[in-house]
Image: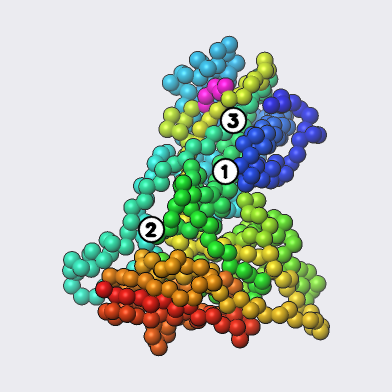
Amino acid sequence: MPMMNNDTQNLRSREQIRESMMQALKDNDAAGYSAAFDEMLQRVGADLRGEIEQREEEMRQNADAAILAQRGVRQLTSEERSFFTGVIEAMKSANPMQALQNPALVLPETTINSVFDELQTRHPLLSRINFRPSGGAVELLMSENGYQMAQWGELCDDIVKELLASFVKVDTMLRKLSAFLPVCKAMLDLGPEWLDRFVREVLYEALANGLEYGIVAGTGNNMPIGMNREVGPNVTVTGGVYPVKAAIKLNDLRPESIGRLLSLLATDPSGKPRMVRDVLLLVSPSDYFLRVMPATTVQAADGSYRNNVLPYPMDVIQSMALEPGQAIIGIGYRYFAVAGTAREGRIEYSDHYRFLEDERVYLIKAYANGMPMDNNAFQNLDISGLKPLTLRVEQVEGSAASADATLASLSLGAAALSPAFASGTITYTAATTNASNVVRAIPADAGAEVEVKLGNTVVANGSAVTWAAGSNTLTVKVTAEDGTTTKTYTVTVTKS
């Protein structure tokens, strides 16, 4: 690991380093991630050294703490100052491993809270999901329905049971994240304020990058479950890995196409309607400039341009966790994530990396996890064919409407389809003892229309279908964007 020094000419920007870290996570390249994170630590240290030197000059001119606070210098509490002064002394000692065992050297809660405050406000994605700080394992009481309706009449046991049955208890076992702090001895002379800022910046970078990757594309195996993954009681998890959702092709951002996607978010897994708000559209940085920006930029009458113009309010967020051609649309608050530091909150001497006379490496542990709160809250998209927006009046060759009339997925609640669903298979059977099941059909193309019928009766896609005793015929007709190509899937459901 290279030593930190004042020469920043050969160091890349934080954004470039973050991209390398995210790529290493995608490639499961531990060595590459380690090298990129080492570079990030040097970048943070170099940036802060310059800031501290500039602010120290200001402090020499005016020692008034109130004025410094207005200028952005974070004033340490007595507990924080005592902690970082003790850590500096321990790091300077001949035996830092032993010195850091001092029971008094526990990271102050105010420092930890400051890190999470920044995560919840600075980070484009973490500031828009249901993100909470935590000191350990979390037991979450989660509503499966997301929508409840008051009942008129006398309160009876059946109503109480129905309300209680709509909640499930979820244990979120936190996963460990390790942040390494290479600290040059000379930098310890800058004082507690510098070390406090350095620790907070490093924790922010480690948590922000690790959490973003896990939240967007995590497999669920010793990491969060990503927005692009299938979740729920009927999902088959193999080796701790949750399956990736089938991708819906999105070739344009017309109101009709966006409206159909949002309609898939507008019902919960039990088939009840819910309000759609806080919508996020996640795309890779390259896709944003190559595909999304041309499709969402319009020129105003005064000649200026307006970016991210979409038919429904949503935040477009660039995420390096996504590959080109991939995108995710979903309800931000329906992703739950927690993060915290180790219970003891210690900065520890680390022998994970070599160290030189003037530079030693320390370790601080953090814990985090996350998951979609239901399987309908996020949809995986394929935007490789997204077309630019055309507003000028001119004669152009119109692109052919899609002839894709297949389904990406078909489910009947807890009732299993036989054979297992495949887009090319149109005939299925299923058996159930339930009075009803939620039928959910997801088209492979966002421009296609889906019609669900029980016998000759049309039922809403995503709603509960009530079965008659014996044999029931359910049909799902998909009409492609071209208006002529159709495909009908048939499920014979036996109610016993």
Front: mark 1 or 2: 2
Q: Quadrant of the C terminus?
A: bottom left
Q: Earlier in the sequence, mark 1 or mark 3?
A: 3
Which residue has dot 1 on it? 210
In the rendered structure, which segment of residues is drawn in magenta?
Answer: 347-351
On the image, the x and y values in percent for residue 442 come to 51, 71
Q: Earlier in the sequence, mark 1 or mark 2?
A: 1
Front: mark 3 or 2: 2
Is label 1 in contact with label 2 (beta carbons under 8 Å)? no
Which residue has dot 2 on it? 233
In reply to whether residue 350 is colored magenta, the answer given is yes
Q: CA distance from mark 3 to mark 2?
A: 38 Å
**In the picture shown, does residue 119 fall above or below 393?**
above
Residue type indicated by callout 2:
Pro
Coloring applied to the structure = rainbow
At a point 40% along the width and 60% down the height, the residue shown is: 234
Q: Quadrant of residue 308?
A: bottom right
On the image, the x and y values in percent for residue 357 come to 67, 15
Which residue has dot 3 on it? 180
